[in-house]
Image: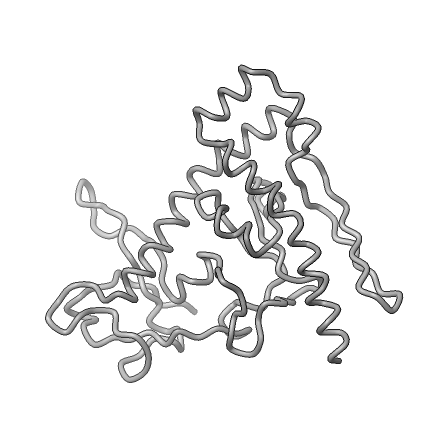
Amino acid sequence: MANRVPLDNVAHANLRAAVRRGADFGDAVNQTLVVPTEFESVQREYPIFIRKDAEGQWVAVALLGLDRGENLFLEGDRWQARYIPAVHRRGPFFLGIRGDGEARELAVHVDLDDPRIGETEGEPLFREHGGDSPYLDHVTQALHLIHEGLAAGRGFYAALERMGLLQPVELDADVGDGKTYAITGLFTVGMQQFQSLGAAQLEELHRAGYLAPLIFIRASLPNMNHLIDIKKRRIGQG
């Protein structure tokens, strides 16, 4: 069970966080949540797709592998990519509410039961004489990126759906030796549908700040070839 509490620079002055990657820390997944505020960085490494989550809401995911529980960018305790999605960079930290009534505010929370948290190993959370450490600044930035991206995503995906831009994708990945993968339930931005938009719709997307993330989704699709190449190499090593 998680033991999440608001991070406090007095009570938690000596806490450290070990920066670890691996299956034990939720990194062994073949799809991971990404948000529009990080699409520019995500699209340089991973293919981005849109799908429905367990609650039936549209979300974006970066495809990391072809088998369930497979992250092809994870090698032992190392994530081999130039960019790691924010939901994995945040580590054992979360945004939550601190205070009551008018004093309620967003604050960083830490899971004290997470094995990466302790007082002997890893990056300090606070400077010796007060103030957040560079590592905690990095974590806080990732948390706010997620928070703002989730808020922006609701309007973004609604606009794509309303304008008929969401196109289902059937991924058939051939990795050789007669082995193929069929991945269903994913959507992308249809280029033909996008090119058919009128000036008023394009202006609406532009004013809302939705054109750039839309383009980043399309620009990410060639990364499927890179993903398949990694899979082929892994199979060859096996």
Horizontal side of 192 relative to 50 (left or right) equals: right
x, y percent for residue 37: 44, 44
Where is 61 relative to 161, above or below? below
Q: Quadrant of residue 90?
A: bottom left
Q: Quadrant of residue 216?
A: top right
Residue placed most toward the observer, 193 or 59: 193
x, y percent for residue 52: 62, 43
Q: Exactly how many numbered labels are in the figure?
A: 0
The quadrant in which the C terminus is found is bottom right
Residue placed most toward the observer, 72 or 5: 72
Where is 230 relative to 203, above or below? below
Horizontal side of 8 relative to 47 (left or right) equals: left
x, y percent for residue 3: 35, 68
> Residue sitting at 62 percent across and 55 percent down?
63
Where is 34 relative to 195, above or below? below
> Residue sitting at 78 percent across and 56 percent down?
173
Q: Quadrant of residue 64?
A: bottom right
Horizontal side of 21 relative to 55 (left or right) equals: left
> Residue sitting at 53 percent across and 15 percent down?
200
Q: Residue furthest bottom?
A: 120
How are the residues colored?
Answer: one colour
